[in-house]
C-alpha cells in the first residue's frame, strides 16, 4: 500500500499504522517521509500513555509547543524554506498544519493537568487527531504537487 492509498484509508477511519513506503515515497527533497510520519503518529500514543498513567515521562509544554525542533519542523524552517517548495500554497498549509499540531499536543497535556483525563481524551480524539491528519494530507499534497512539476 502506497502513501496516498494509506492516507485515504486513514482519513476514512482505517488503521493508523503507516505501511513501509517505497523508496520514491520515502525520500522527498531531503526529508525522510517515513521517519517523519512515524514520529508524528507516535505522538498520539505518547500523549495517550501520559494521560492514561501508563508513562512516567514528564512532558514539557515548552518543548512540545515548539514546531521547529522535530525533524519535520527543522526541514520546514531550515531546508525546505530555502527552496522553491516554499512558493507552493501546499507548503504554507503544511507549515500551518504542523504549527497547529504542536499547539494542540501541548494543549492536550495542559488540559490533562488542569481538567483531567476526560477533557484531555476528548481533545486527543478530536482536534489532535484532526491536526495529525492535516499534516499527513498537507505533506502528501505538497509531494504530489512538486512531483507533478517534474
Image (cartoon, rainbow, N blue to C red):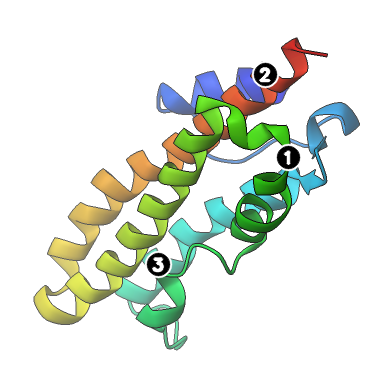
Mark found first going from the N terminus, 3 or 2: 3
SS label for mark 3:
helix
Question: If the image is split into quadrants, where does the C terminus sit?
Answer: top right
Residue receiving disc 3: 47
Residue receiving disc 1: 83
* Residue 142 circle label: none
Q: Residue furthest left?
A: 115
Closer mark to the observer between disc 3 and disc 2 = 2
Q: CA distance from mark 3 to mark 2?
A: 30 Å
How many discs mark residues in the rendered view? 3
* Residue 144 circle label: 2
**Within 10 angstroms of label 2, few (less than 14), some, or many (20 or more) residues?**
few
Query: Foreground residue, 141 or 125?
Result: 141
Mark found first going from the N terminus, 1 or 3: 3
**Within 10 angstroms of label 1, few (less than 14), some, or many (20 or more) residues?**
few
Look at 85% across and 29% down and name the residue there: 22
Q: CA distance from mark 1 to mark 3?
A: 33 Å
Look at 54% across and 51% down and name the residue there: 41
| Res 132 quadrant in image | top left
Task: Give the vertical position of 59 relative to 52 (above or below).
Answer: below
Question: If the image is split into quadrants, where does the N terminus sit?
Answer: top right
The answer to whether residue 67 of the structure is visible from this angle is yes
Closer mark to the observer between disc 1 and disc 3 = 1
Amino acid at each position: 500500500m502506497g502513501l496516498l492509498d494509506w492516507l485515504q484509508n486513514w482519513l476514512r477511519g482505517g488503521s493508523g499504522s503507516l505501511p513501509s513506503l517505497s523508496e520514491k515515497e520515502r525520500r522527498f527533497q531531503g526529508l525522510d517521509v517515513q521517519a517523519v510520519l512515524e514520529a508524528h503518529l507516535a505522538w498520539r500514543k505518547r500523549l495517550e500513555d501520559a494521560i492514561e498513567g501508563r508513562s512516567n515521562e514528564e512532558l514539557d509544554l515548552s518543548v512540545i509547543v515548539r514546531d521547529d525542533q522535530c525533524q519535520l519542523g527543522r526541514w520546514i524552517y531550515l531546508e525546505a524554506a530555502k527552496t522553491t517548495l516554499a512558493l507552493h500554497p501546499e507548503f504554507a498549509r503544511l507549515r500551518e498544519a504542523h504549527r497547529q499540531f504542536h499547539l494542540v499536543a501541548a494543549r492536550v497535556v495542559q488540559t490533562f493537568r488542569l481538567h483531567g483525563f476526560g477533557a484531555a481524551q476528548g481533545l486527543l480524539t478530536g482536534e489532535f487527531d484532526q491536526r495529525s491528519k492535516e499534516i499527513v494530507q498537507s505533506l502528501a499534497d505538497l509531494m504530489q504537487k512538486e512531483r507533478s512539476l517534474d
